[in-house]
Each structure stands twice: as structure tokens, then as C-alpha cells.
Image (cartoon, helix red, strand yellow):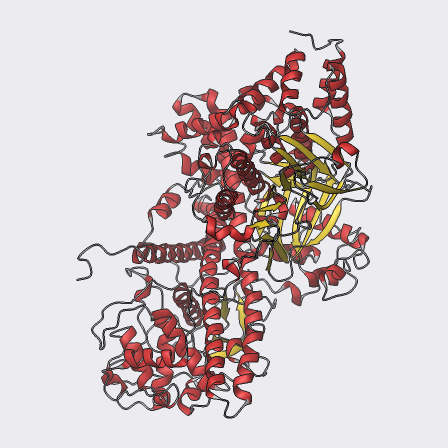
């Protein structure tokens, strides 16, 4: 074995190569290594074997072992799978380099061109477990010793590019820097091949390079000609990234990272940030790597108010252009946000520098994201075929808060390399393209949870990565348009054809369906979609058909048309989840026939597949329970509870969530007592309903109507009275006193005054951060007062009425009541990795802190640790100091002592923290995915409203339009209504997820507060302490009740979607 002080020049060059931290240093040291060994760089996989054979150096042996293990996988066929294939890779980003490495391992000749000459992006990428294992298997820790030590699961783009560049060079990839790919040069004649158009003028060898595979990884702004790109739009979203210098001091290493905190489930943190600094964010992430990296989503109005943006321009490019951004104000903005998020513990924040020597800050727009319609194409001319594939951002632009970019980018690189292998094996072009598109369909659905759990088995073969793999999901005939042969007739894509999945519904079809549903009911004769519904009898018959037993015919006797119609509209909303689109007065008067047709079409689209059985013979509620219905029940329960707390009489029977009920859909409708007619909605609910917005007074078109509390609004007008946030079903409440609507964060407290109510930060003087008024941490931040107001009659808490699910019982039974040694600084911070470690610990072991009855949790953690770290010496590197709170540390130590395996404690601790970090990131990604889709739905609804307004105006503009034109207009309007209802149903599903996240966060916060009170000695508790404890307990019980209802609703829906067993229908 050679000495570390060897004088062999090749050894010195190799050490320089390993340690190089700049792109040019990597290239020069590798050039020196090749010259010392008498080799030419870029010689393909044979070059690697020559370097390995000649460089008999102790420092290189562990790296050779890893690369040999990877190259020895059967799929590569000892580097002979693609020996006759010549590839051009465009772009030296992480995905382009990863694809080049796989192609080199297959034995292909790989040439890579990159327009830049240095790696300068400090931004940090989140890594999935399989990407960590994959990079370790390529020798990542040999090139970057700090790679994912301990619980770290991220790496800067620059470091990732450097280590992949080193691997690519060793495997013989030929790399050209400062060369821009501008297009393809088709073969001029038979017998010649495809070449690249490059700038500036490349060397003759590169200019004459003919290839049969092109892999584009040049980023989202460059997609080769021939590919179709689809835009996915949401509402305006402004992201800001910033990198601060990491001095690696002890104080800096002890500052916990923030894997992600989002407004959607932790509004209090962001409201406190707004009050203390004037900064209004949607989310924030903080990672430590080469730099302190922060990324956040800021609101435009906040940036304008704080002077970061000079003017409000409608064009995004102009809004975020350098001429409209004030650099000094942006620097103050990010400093204040970072300082607040880390409680001032990072000290003086010094900006890292970008490639141009400027502070490394950027504001970018991710309102729209691009996604290629296909991942591959084949072009053929003069008999020469070219296979084109996309990877990285030019395939799918990632939504950065999800942390999926590099993981899905690597998966796409593997899939593209597998495609090249199939191409080299002689598979037909259509077969290769069909397989690649089948894999592409899986890409957007992938997550660490739905892929194979054993990351050590991942390889180039898709079957090693995707559990549910169908390589024939797309057939060769479906990809004929992706095979482009010169002079070939163009083939129309299936996706370009008019969607026939949901055939258009006309008014005659709707009329026939209504007649079928109301047939057999006395006194009901539906002959049209206007006057036949004026007396309310037909609408009540339709409800009775769809929900038998809801309303007895005898109860309709003596009711006027207005009362019967109002009652039917109310029951349809409360019991079927179908919200009104017009008022009872409009139905009776027949003044809005288009609105009535649109309303009835909602019944048709929801229940059209229900088997026809005239009369009230059907039993039970048909179909799957609706998220709209469940959220509506929650909404009315909240209103009724608050009204009762305020001493108001809600009238009728209570519409409340019964904890003892079997299902949430068994909510009792407000059926009147015997002999008492139903009470129609109050007059204020009917005033101007359906025609004018109850807030702005402007006209409401059919697709614009949003109904709440019996009144109609524009969706754009229906906002929180305090903060003006968009209000969605299940996410707002109405104050009984002033009648205004509020988001749940700003809904004023009723009943006994509670000091904990936060006034809206927007209504106060919002501070503007400057260089001399930076928040210094928890001790100087503005804090809301603790809730200490008494709760009336708390002596008998209703604990015995709670019906807990098994997970709830386990979590509550394992609550640790030991107080934290340090007072937790308000406002409540984002859930820390330490806090989530407690949950991970509770979920991994039975009875922690006591003798362990089962060793399954221990074995599972040991097995996982063995998979995640193949060599123990790699974990001996110095790692960031990550602290657990004393409760968790004590519990883990007790567990290790009782099981007699103290030697395993460090491994368990590290694995526990990694579990916690993964859970934190998973939760953040889930929230951000929901938020993004909600924004996209909001944008889509706005487009539908604009289109619907045009159609409605056309239908109403002519007093007697031709029947054909009228039928086409109605058909188009009903299509738009159906699309709107579909989007609203999806929005309700997402709001259920939001509700679940909010309840989880609220329960955790209440747990923390309640522990501090319950752990106090009884003699030391003041009356205010006891009252506050009772109040917290009452709130905790309410949250557990709501979570239990949500769980049972989801279970009921799951069971309702299962196919019935034979004979079960009887």
C-alpha cells in the first residue's frame, strides 16, 4: 500500500481531483491525472479500467470498489449493452450528469456539452432516501466527506454537480465547456448522421460528431423542436432564495433547520412574523450546507408595501425584472425573515456571493410551470434515426416546495437510459417510445411512500424501482405521432381530439331524467325546466326520490310554493351537498330559467348513475359520501356552536356533529316537530339572492355564484373581513354579532371575552424592517398574551363522551407530562425536528421509558440503518449538532438501557432524527401540493367564470334565438357548469386535507400547552391556571372529536367504494 506521502505525481493529481471544489480545478487535476498515466480524457468506459489498473493507490481503492459494484450489475452487461451507441447530452446539471453516468456504464460513447464554465448555484436540494443511497454507491462521500452525515438529507446544487462531474470524468464521458447547443443538423444525404448546431464554433472533432441519441437536460427554457409543452398555471407565486455565509461556528451548527413550515397549517407563525417584521409569507424552508440557505414564498402586496418592488406591473417579467426590484430592500427583507425564523441565533447574516460577485439572492416566479406532453421522440431522415429524450426541468419543471426535483430528475434519467438500452437492443421505435411514455405516466405520481422500500435494490431496470409497473400502459399505436419520418403524413394525436369521456348533456336529456325521477309522485307533472318547478312540489319529489324519508308528503300540505321551495333548497344543500345556484323566489317566479337548469344539472351529474326505481322504495343514501357535504356539516356545526356560545337561539333541532353517531352522514335534518311547518330561510337571506352579489352589489352570472348562509357572492368578493384571504368551504366562519365572514385564524371569539384573540395584523401599524430594527429573536418578538380567561362550568369535562380511534388512544395514552427545561418562546414556532422525533419514537417502540415488551421497533430501526449506511466508517464523519429535547433523550436512553443495548444508542438516535426529518418534510410537501392545486383550481374557476359569462350573455341577448343556437348555447353552458362542479368537488377534497393538517397542528400545540399546566403541583396552581387548564382541555377534546369524525368519514367513504359482495344487495 502506498504511503499517504507518496511522491508519485499521479497520486498527487488524484488527491487534488478528489478535493477540488471548483469546476476548473476538477478539470485541470483530471487532465493532469490522465497525462501522468499516459491517457486521453473522454475515452469511454475502457478509460476507467485503464485508470484503475494503473493507479494502484490506497486512497482510490474504496472508490474503485464502489464503482465496480455499480458497473457489475447485470443490466449493464459488463459495459457492453450499448457499445455501438453514440449519445449527446445537453446540459451539465445534476440530471444531465446523472444520465451521462448511466449511459457511460452501459458502454455508450457519451459527449456532454454545457454552456456554462463554472458551477455557482448554492441552492440546496432535498434528497429522497433512494437518491442518498444512489449517490453513496457512486462514491459521493469520497468526493464530499460531509455528504448526508447524520440526519442530513440535502446537498447544494454546486456540490452535487461537482461529485457527479468527477464520476462522469472517471467513467470516460467527454465534456465540452462554454458550448451552447442551438439545434439539430439533419443528415444531408443517405449514409450520413445527425449532428448538432453549436455556438461558438466548436472544435472540428465536436462539430463532426454524429450521434444517434440526444438527451436534453438543458433546463425548462430549452426544449428541442418537436416536443409539445403544456403550461400549468396557478395564481401569482413569487419565490425568493437567499444564501448566507456558513461560518460553521458552534453556534451556527446548533441552530435547527426548518424542513418546511406552511401557512396552510401554521397560520399563527406567519401572523407573528407579519406583526414583528411586516413580512407576509406563504411558506419558508431553511437548510444548512455550504451556506445557510433559505427559500420562501412572498406575497406581492407585502413586497410592494415594503418597497422591495417599485411598481405593480401585470406582466410577471416586468414585475420581477431587475429594474423593478430594489436590491437593498430585498436584502433587508430576507435578512429579517431569516432572522425571525431562526430566533436570531445565526448572528450577523453575511450574504454569500453568486457567480458575478453579487449577494446571492433571487426573486423568481413559479406561477406557471411547464410540463412536456411526451418524454421522447424519434426522428428519421435519409434512413438515419435519432432518438430524443428529455430529463430534468425540460421534462417537468418541479414545484420547489415539494422537494421532488432531483429525485424525479434522477428517476427520469434512469428511465431515459433504460430507453437507450432498449434502443440499442434493436427494439422497434414505436415499442421503445410506448415503453418510455408508460414510465413517464408514473413519474408525477412517485413519492418515497409509493416506491419500493428497499432502496438498495434500485437500478436501471424500472421493475427495481416501481412496484406497480405496466410497460404496456401506452400502446405503440398511441405514440405514432412521436415517430417523425421525413415526408411522412402527420398523425393526429389522440390527446388533440375532443374529449369524449363526458358526453355533453342537453336540456332534453336533463328534462327526461327529471321526469323519470319524479314520476309516480302525486300532484307532480314535470313538462319543462321552468314553470313545472314553480310550486316547489317537483323539487321536493326529486329530493324524496334521491333521499327517501327526508320529507313526508303530508308535511308539504299547507305549505306555500315559496316555503316548499326554500325548504327543498335547504335540504339539498344540507343532506346532498348540492349548493343553491338561485334563490327560492327566483324558482317560484320563474325569473331565472338558466339558473334553474344549471342547478338541476348538478343533481343529474351527481346521481345520473343511480338505478331508476320510481317511488320511495330505495333505502339509504346513494353513492359515495361527498366531501362538500361533510365540510358543509362542519361549517354549520361551527356556526351553531359559536351562536350557542354567544347565547343565541339557533332555532329548530341542532345540526351538530354527533360523536356517538355511527357516521357523519347521519346528521339529523332540522325536521320540525309534528304539526309545525318547516321554517323558510329568513328574508335577509333572500334579498337580492342570485342576481346581485351580497357584498359588492354587482350582477352575478350563473358560473360566478357562490352561496353561503343563503346569500350569493362572487368568489373573488368572498374573503375574510380582516385579512381579505380567499374563503373556501370548511375554512371560514361567520361572526354572529357583526354578520361578517372570517377565516378561522381571524374569526372573533364569542361569549366570555378571551384575551388570546389576535387582532388582524393588517389592521395595525405593520412595521417595516430596516437595518436598525431587525428582530433579535424570541425575547424581542411581539407575543400574543396567553389565554387565561375562565371557562364557564368546567367542573365536569365531557371526556366520557369522546370516541377515540385506535391511533388517537395510543397517542393520548403515551403523552409525556414532563415539562420542557426551557420555556418555549411564543409565538409558537414551526414544528421542530425534535418535536417530530417524539412522534417517531412513540411510533417505533411500545411503552418507551418502560421495559420494552417487543423488539420489533428496534429490529426495524437496525435494519433500516443497515440499508441506509452500507459502510460504518462513512458515518464517523463529523456531523451537524442536532439536539433532542430532554424528554426524548431520556426516553431513548431508558429504552437502550432496559434493552441492554447501549452500544446501539447512537445508531437509534440518528435513525430517529432521520425519521423525524422525513416526517416533517412529508407534511410540508403535502401542504404545499394542496396549496398549489388550490391555486390552480382558483385560476381555472376564474377562466370558467369568464367563459360562462360570455355564453350566458349570448343566450340572454336575443329574445327569441333560433332553437338550434339556443340548444348549442345551453349545452355549452351545462358543460361549463359540470366542469365547475367537478373543480369544486376536488377543492372540497383538498380542503379535507387542509382540515386534517390543521387539526394535527392544533392538537400538537394544545398538547404542549396542556402538559405545562398538568405537570404543575396542585398546590402551586392559581385559579387562573386551573381555568386555563380546563379551557385547554375543552379545546383538546373538541379537536379530538373533529379528528375522530374526519377519520370515520374517510372510513365510511372507503367502505362505500368497495364492491358489494354477492347477495349483499338484498
Task: Decide which of 368, 101 is in the foreground and name it.
Answer: 101
The answer to which quarter of the image holds residue 490 is bottom right
Task: Decide which of 773, 507 is in the foreground and name it.
Answer: 507
Task: Decide which of 493, 651 is in the foreground and name it.
Answer: 493
Give the mark count.
0
**Image quarter in which the N terminus is found:** top right
The residue drawn where x is 22% and y is 71% is 618
345 left or right, relative to 137:
right
1009 left or right, relative to 588:
right
**Image quarter in which the C terminus is found:** bottom left
Specify whether residue 828 is in view: no
The answer to which quarter of the image holds residue 289 is top right
| Image vertical order of residue 515 relative to residue 755, above or below | below
The residue drawn where x is 29% and y is 61% is 661
Specify whether residue 716 is in view: yes
x then y, percent, for residue 396: 59, 49
501 left or right, relative to 724:
left
x then y, percent, for residue 99: 60, 36
Task: Decide which of 1000, 496 is in the foreground and name it.
Answer: 496
x then y, percent, for residue 777: 68, 46
863 left or right, relative to 696:
left
| Image vertical order of residue 30 relative to residue 800, above or below | above
x then y, percent, for residue 555: 25, 84
Q: Residue furthest front?
A: 190
Amino acid at each position: 500500500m502506498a504511503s499517504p506521502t507518496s511522491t508519485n505525481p499521479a497520486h498527487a493529481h488524484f488527491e487534488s481531483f478528489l478535493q477540488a471544489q471548483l469546476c476548473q480545478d476538477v478539470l485541470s487535476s483530471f487532465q493532469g491525472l490522465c497525462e501522468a498515466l499516459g491517457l486521453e480524457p473522454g475515452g469511454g468506459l475502457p478509460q476507467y479500467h485503464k485508470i484503475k489498473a494503473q493507479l494502484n493507490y490506497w486512497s482510490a481503492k474504496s472508490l474503485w470498489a464502489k464503482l465496480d459494484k455499480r458497473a457489475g450489475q447485470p443490466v449493464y452487461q459488463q459495459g457492453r449493452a450499448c457499445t455501438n451507441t453514440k449519445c449527446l447530452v445537453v446540459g451539465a446539471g445534476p440530471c444531465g450528469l446523472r444520465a451521462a453516468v448511466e449511459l457511460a456504464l452501459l458502454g455508450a460513447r457519451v459527449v456532454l456539452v454545457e454552456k456554462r464554465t463554472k458551477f455557482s448555484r448554492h441552492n440546496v436540494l432535498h434528497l429522497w432516501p433512494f437518491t442518498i443511497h444512489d449517490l453513496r454507491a457512486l462514491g459521493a462521500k469520497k468526493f464530499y466527506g460531509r455528504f448526508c452525515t447524520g440526519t442530513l438529507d440535502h446537498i447544494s446544487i454546486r456540490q452535487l454537480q461537482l461529485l457527479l462531474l468527477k464520476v462522469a470524468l472517471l467513467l470516460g464521458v467527454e465534456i465540452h465547456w462554454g458550448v451552447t447547443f442551438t439545434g439539430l443538423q439533419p443528415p444531408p444525404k443517405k449514409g450520413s448522421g445527425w449532428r448538432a448546431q453549436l455556438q461558438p464554433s466548436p472544435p472540428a472533432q465536436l462539430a463532426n460528431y454524429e450521434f444517434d441519441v440526444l438527451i436534453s437536460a438543458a433546463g425548462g427554457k430549452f426544449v428541442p423542436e418537436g416536443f409539445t409543452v403544456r403550461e400549468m398555471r396557478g395564481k401569482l407565486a413569487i419565490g425568493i432564495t437567499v444564501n448566507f455565509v456558513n461560518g460553521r461556528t458552534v453556534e451556527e451548527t446548533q441552530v435547527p433547520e426548518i424542513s418546511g413550515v406552511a401557512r396552510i397549517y401554521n397560520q399563527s407563525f406567519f401572523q407573528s412574523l407579519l406583526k414583528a417584521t411586516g413580512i407576509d409569507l406563504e411558506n419558508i424552508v431553511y437548510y444548512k450546507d455550504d451556506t445557510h440557505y433559505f427559500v420562501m414564498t412572498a406575497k406581492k402586496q407585502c413586497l410592494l408595501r415594503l418597497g422591495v418592488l417599485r411598481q405593480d406591473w401585470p406582466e410577471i417579467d416586468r414585475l420581477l425584472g431587475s429594474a423593478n426590484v430594489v436590491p437593498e430592500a430585498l436584502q433587508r427583507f430576507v435578512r429579517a425573515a431569516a432572522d425571525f425564523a431562526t430566533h436570531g441565533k445565526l448572528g450577523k447574516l453575511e450574504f454569500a456571493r453568486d457567480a458575478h460577485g453579487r449577494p446571492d439572492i433571487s426573486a423568481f416566479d413559479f406561477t406557471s410551470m411547464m410540463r412536456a406532453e411526451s418524454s421522447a421522440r424519434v426522428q428519421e431522415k435519409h434512413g438515419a434515426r435519432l432518438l430524443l429524450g428529455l430529463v430534468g426541468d425540460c421534462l417537468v419543471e418541479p414545484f420547489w416546495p415539494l422537494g421532488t426535483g432531483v429525485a424525479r430528475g434522477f428517476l427520469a434519467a434512469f428511465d431515459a437510459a433504460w430507453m437507450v438500452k432498449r434502443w440499442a437492443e434493436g427494439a422497434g421505435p414505436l415499442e421503445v417510445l410506448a415503453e418510455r411514455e408508460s414510465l413517464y405516466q408514473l413519474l408525477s405520481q412517485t413519492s418515497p411512500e409509493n416506491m419500493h422500500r428497499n432502496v438498495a435494490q434500485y437500478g436501471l431496470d424500472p421493475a427495481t424501482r416501481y412496484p406497480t409497473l405496466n410497460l404496456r400502459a401506452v400502446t405503440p399505436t398511441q405514440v405514432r405521432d412521436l415517430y417523425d419520418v421525413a415526408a411522412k403524413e402527420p398523425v393526429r394525436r389522440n390527446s388533440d381530439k375532443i374529449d369524449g369521456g363526458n358526453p355533453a348533456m342537453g336540456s332534453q336529456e336533463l328534462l327526461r331524467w327529471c321526469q323519470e325521477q319524479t314520476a309516480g309522485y302525486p300532484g307532480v307533472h314535470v313538462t319543462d325546466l321552468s314553470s313545472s318547478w314553480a310550486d316547489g312540489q317537483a323539487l321536493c319529489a326529486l329530493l324524496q326520490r334521491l333521499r327517501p324519508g327526508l320529507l313526508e308528503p303530508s308535511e308539504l300540505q299547507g305549505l306555500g310554493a315559496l316555503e316548499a321551495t326554500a325548504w327543498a333548497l335547504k335540504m339539498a344543500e344540507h343532506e346532498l351537498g348540492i349548493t343553491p345556484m338561485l334563490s327560492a323566489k327566483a324558482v317560484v317566479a320563474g325569473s331565472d330559467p338558466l339558473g334553474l337548469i344549471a342547478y338541476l344539472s348538478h343533481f343529474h351529474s351527481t346521481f345520473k348513475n343511480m338505478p331508476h326505481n320510481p317511488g320511495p322504495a330505495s333505502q339509504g343514501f346513494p353513492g359515495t359520501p361527498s366531501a362538500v357535504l361533510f365540510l358543509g356539516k362542519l361549517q354549520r356545526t361551527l356556526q351553531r356552536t359559536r351562536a350557542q356560545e354567544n347565547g343565541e337561539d339557533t332555532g329548530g333541532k341542532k345540526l351538530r356533529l354527533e360523536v356517538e353517531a355511527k357516521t357523519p352522514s347521519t346528521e339529523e335534518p332540522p325536521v320540525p316537530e309534528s304539526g309545525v311547518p318547516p321554517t323558510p330561510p329568513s328574508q335577509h337571506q333572500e334579498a337580492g339572492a342570485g342576481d346581485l352579489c351580497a357584498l359588492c352589489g354587482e350582477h352575478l352570472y350563473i358560473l360566478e355564484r357562490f352561496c353561503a348562509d343563503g346569500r350569493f357572492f362572487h368568489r373573488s368578493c368572498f374573503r375574510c373581513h380582516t385579512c381579505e384571504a380567499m374563503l373556501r368551504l370548511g375554512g371560514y366562519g361567520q361572526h354572529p354579532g357583526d354578520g361578517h365572514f372570517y377565516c378561522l385564524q381571524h374569526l372573533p371569539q364569542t361569549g366570555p371575552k378571551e384575551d388570546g384573540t389576535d387582532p388582524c395584523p393588517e389592521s395595525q401599524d405593520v412595521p417595516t424592517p430596516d437595518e436598525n430594527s431587525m428582530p433579535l429573536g424570541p425575547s424581542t418578538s411581539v407575543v400574543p398574551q396567553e389565554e387565561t380567561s375562565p371557562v364557564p362550568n368546567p367542573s365536569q369535562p365531557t371526556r366520557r363522551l369522546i370516541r377515540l380511534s385506535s391511533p388517537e388512544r395510543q397517542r393520548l395514552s403515551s403523552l409525556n407530562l414532563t415539562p420542557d427545561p426551557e420555556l418555549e418562546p411564543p409565538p409558537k414556532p414551526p414544528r421542530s425536528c425534535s418535536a417530530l422525533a417524539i412522534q417517531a419514537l412513540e411510533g417505533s417502540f411500545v411503552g418507551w421509558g418502560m421495559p420494552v415488551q417487543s423488539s420489533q421497533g428496534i429490529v426495524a430501526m437496525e435494519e433500516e440503518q443497515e440499508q441506509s449506511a452500507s459502510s460504518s466508517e462513512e458515518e464517523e464523519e463529523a456531523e451537524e449538532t442536532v439536539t433532542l429535547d430532554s424528554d426524548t433523550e431520556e426516553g431513548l436512553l431508558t429504552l437502550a438501557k432496559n434493552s441492554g443495548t447501549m452500544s446501539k444508542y447512537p445508531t437509534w438516535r440518528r435513525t430517529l432524527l432521520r425519521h423525524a426529518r422525513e416526517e416533517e418534510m412529508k407534511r410540508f410537501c403535502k401542504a404545499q401540493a394542496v396549496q398549489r392545486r388550490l391555486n390552480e383550481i382558483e385560476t381555472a374557476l376564474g377562466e370558467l367564470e369568464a367563459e360562462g359569462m360570455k355564453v350566458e350573455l349570448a343566450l340572454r341577448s336575443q329574445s327569441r334565438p333560433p332553437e338550434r343556437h339556443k340548444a348549442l348555447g345551453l349545452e355549452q353552458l351545462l358543460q361549463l357548469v359540470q366542469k365547475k362542479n367537478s373543480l369544486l368537488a376536488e377543492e372540497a377534497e383538498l380542503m379535507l386535507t387542509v382540515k386534517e393538517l390543521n387539526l394535527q397542528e392544533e392538537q400538537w400545540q394544545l398538547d404542549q400547552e396542556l402538559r405545562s399546566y398538568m405537570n404543575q403541583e396542585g398546590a402551586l396552581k392559581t385559579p387562573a391556571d386551573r381555568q386555563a387548564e380546563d379551557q385547554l382541555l375543552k379545546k383538546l377534546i373538541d379537536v379530538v372529536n373533529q379528528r375522530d369524525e374526519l377519520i370515520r368519514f374517510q372510513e365510511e367513504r372507503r367502505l362505500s367504494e368497495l364492491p358489494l359482495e354477492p347477495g349483499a344487495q338484498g
